[in-house]
Image (spheres, grey):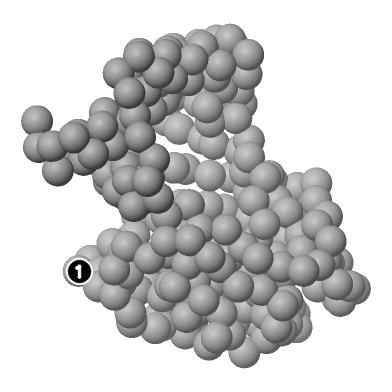
Amino acid sequence: MMEKLPLSVIVLAYNEEDNLPDCLKSASFAAEIILVDSGSTDKSDDIAKSFGCKILQRPLNGDYAAQRNFAIAHASNEWVMMLDADERITSELAEEIKEAVLSNQDFCWRISRENHFVEGKVLHGVLRPDKVERLFKKSSAKYEGSVHERLQCPFPKKELQGRLIHFPYKSWEIHLDKMNRYTTMLAQKYAAQGKNSNFLSGIMIKPLWAFLKTYVVHLGFLDGKLGFEFCLLHGFYTLEKYIKLRSINRFNGRI
């Protein structure tokens, strides 16, 4: 049996039985895989046990940074990688990860994600490949921010060339539900920060610009129908965020 890489891969999960087998298989080269389960009612934990994962139970409570920091504190290895349940590590990326960990240099490694769907992959627009900081030393890193949490790491950032394959949404219902939850949290966050949304800029101009920027400037039109749909929904996401903020400020969230 090949020696496992001294790396702790951390996966946050809630009812991810469809995604976990391929996700965990792609990370099987790591010496430790930690699954932080936030109350799954499906077979997520059973699947994780079959892969020999360390399973931790903790409610999410809408705070992803706290959940990730909790997992990091339980990692047995100095090198840690964050992996979402809907992501897969390619064989090319796995080799680069091994080289980075074994070299043990003080870097925070960024990885590009490529979004895939049943209809095809999206390489432009709002879902163009993004670079995420995922591979780092445990002793040097901490997440901050409950929504769109960010990794705080003092080391220089470098990029791995391989990509994560990302399957972000199984259905439009899931996508729209996430949009609804995130726009509510962001509107509440903006309101707490004293931000405002007027009708002209927040409700009319910003949503239109969000669509045009992703569809035209970021070449979303090159991804065909999927590109148009996701860019249009990004405009709606922006509208929903600011219309909720305006409602919170003016009418305590009521219409």
Residue receiving disc 1: 41
Residue 96: image location, x then y, percent: 81, 59
- Between 230 and 209, the one lying in front of the other is 209
The front one of 132 and 63 is 63
State left or right for residue 243 relative to residue 87. Answer: left
Evaluate whether residue 201 shows in this view: yes
Q: Quadrant of the C terminus?
A: top left
| For residue 207, above or below residue 29 | above
The image quadrant that residue 72 belongs to is bottom right
In the rendered image, the residue lying farthest to the left is 255
Q: Identify the residue at horizontal 67%, vertical 80% (top origin).
A: 138
> Which residue is rendered at x = 63% and y = 55% of the image?
89
**Which residue is at the front of the view, 55 or 3?**
55
> Residue sitting at 37 percent across and 23 percent down?
202
Q: How many marks?
A: 1
User: Is 229 on the left-hand or right-hand side of 128?
Assistant: left
Measured along the vertical axis of the image, is residue 8 above or below residue 22? below
